[in-house]
Image (cartoon, rainbow, N blue to C red):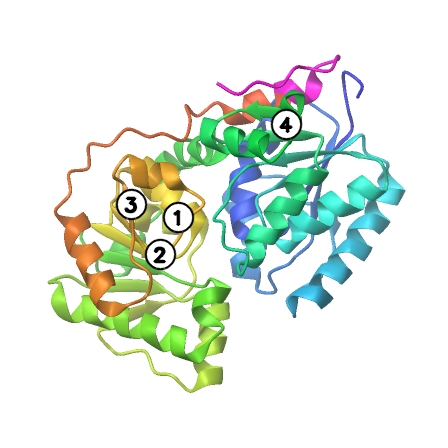
Amino acid sequence: MTAQPKIAIVLGTRPEIIKMSPVIRECQRRSLDFQLIHTEQHQKYEMDRVFFEHLQLPAPLHRLGVGGGPHGRQTGLLLTRVEEVLEREHPDVVLVQGDTNSVLAGALAAAKLHISVGHVEAGLRSYDRRMPEELNRIVADHLSDRLFAPTAKAGDILLAEGVDRKKVFVTGNTIVDAVGQNLQIARERCRALERNGLEPQKYILVTAHRAENVDHRERLQELVNAIDLVARTVSMPLIYPLHPRTESKIKEFGLTIPKRIRIIPPQGFLDFLQLEAEAALVLTDSGGIQEEACILGVPCVTLRQNTERPETLSVGANVLAGTDPSQVLAGVEEMLDRSRDWSNPLGDGHSGARIVDLLLDDGTPSGYVP
């Protein structure tokens, strides 16, 4: 790779935009040759494209308009359209972040064209191959030339899977950078609490949209029952920005969300960040929100039986509860009583700069795992 590589950054969803924003800003700061390829994996504007505006990021040079659909069909279309762009643009390196179908397609298209691949947030594992995200992250890791692991544990996982040590770099998690860069902006500009009639530390924030939780009627009903039990038991409101995927499945299965659960529209990143930072507790099945809550010092109950963010468990910021109502309620009661004095295990807020430093190294840097 040359000292000043041409960089293509493939993005497809809200979490990717947020977590790659520190890398994008660092590329801007250094006046590097880079371009954004937005696959538009999410169909709704408020779920991803608006984040470029909120985060004051440059508009993508390429919008691929892929949208939703079954995994095979969507991934095939993503692969085709990303490949077409890469063949026209001839970047030196393609950066992908996380575990979505856009990540899988971006890494595979680049690898087949013999373009260097950098995977941001490499090495995460839930060890549950029923999750499409798990399959995506495993394949992306083993296609990548530079694997930017967010923690030492993630780096150890990659080494245990036989990845060459020289390819692995423990950089910290870019979400720490993103939260730090945007939290003050959110507090100054956003009125999410006022708009929703909320007081700090006096509400619970809920998110749930993972396929394993919402794509099966019985599981989704159990999830709704669990959230309802919490709403009936705790003496504070539950606020639920309803993800379009979950909303469509609720309608498809003919389910009803009890009125005790306050449904609000999907939130922009800054509004959501403010809601998250001021919550008494977060109930979620999102990996990224487990991280954000840990960084913000907000207790988290994860609506899954596993997590690829074990560091949040080990420091006491998070517990796993699944979707059984009694277990979820027990987790909520435990975390509401827990002290918030844990240390952030995810990084120091300089991960974006480290990643760009490694991309600009004019030799072949030796990987490191602390």
Disc 1 versus disc 4: distance between alpha carbons? 26 Å
**Disc 3 element:** strand
**Disc 2 element:** strand
Disc 2 versus disc 1: distance between alpha carbons? 7 Å
Residue 201 visible in rendering: no
Q: Which residue was labeled with disc 2? A: 284
Disc 4 versus disc 3: distance between alpha carbons? 35 Å
Query: In the rendered view, does 245 fall on the left or right side of 7?
Result: left
Task: Report which quarter residue 316 is drawn in.
Answer: top left
Q: Which residue was labeled with disc 1? A: 289
Residue 307 visible in rendering: yes
Q: Which residue was labeled with disc 4? A: 28
Identify the residue at horizontal 47%, vertical 65% (top origin): 212
Residue type for callout 1:
Ile
Question: Magenta stretch containing residue 359, yes or no?
Answer: yes
Disc 2 versus disc 3: distance between alpha carbons? 10 Å
Q: Which residue was labeled with disc 3? A: 318
Q: Residues within 10 Å of mark 1 (few under 14, many from 20)?
A: many
Proximity of marks 2 and 1: CB atoms separated by less than 8 Å: yes
Proximity of marks 1 and 4: CB atoms separated by less than 8 Å: no
Residue type for callout 2:
Thr
- Magenta portion: prevailing SS class: loop
Residue type for callout 3:
Asn
Relative to residue 158, is residue 279 depicted above or below?
below
Task: State the image coordinates of residue 118 (x, y, percent, origin top left).
Answer: 68, 33
Query: In the rendered view, does 156 fall on the left or right side of 199?
Result: right
Looking at the rendered image, the quarter that the N terminus falls into is top right
Foreground mark, 3 or 1, reads 3
Q: In this rendered view, identify the residue nearer to me: 280 or 187.
A: 280
Magenta segment:
357-370
Sequence-wise first label, 1 or 4: 4
Foreground mark, 2 or 3, reads 3
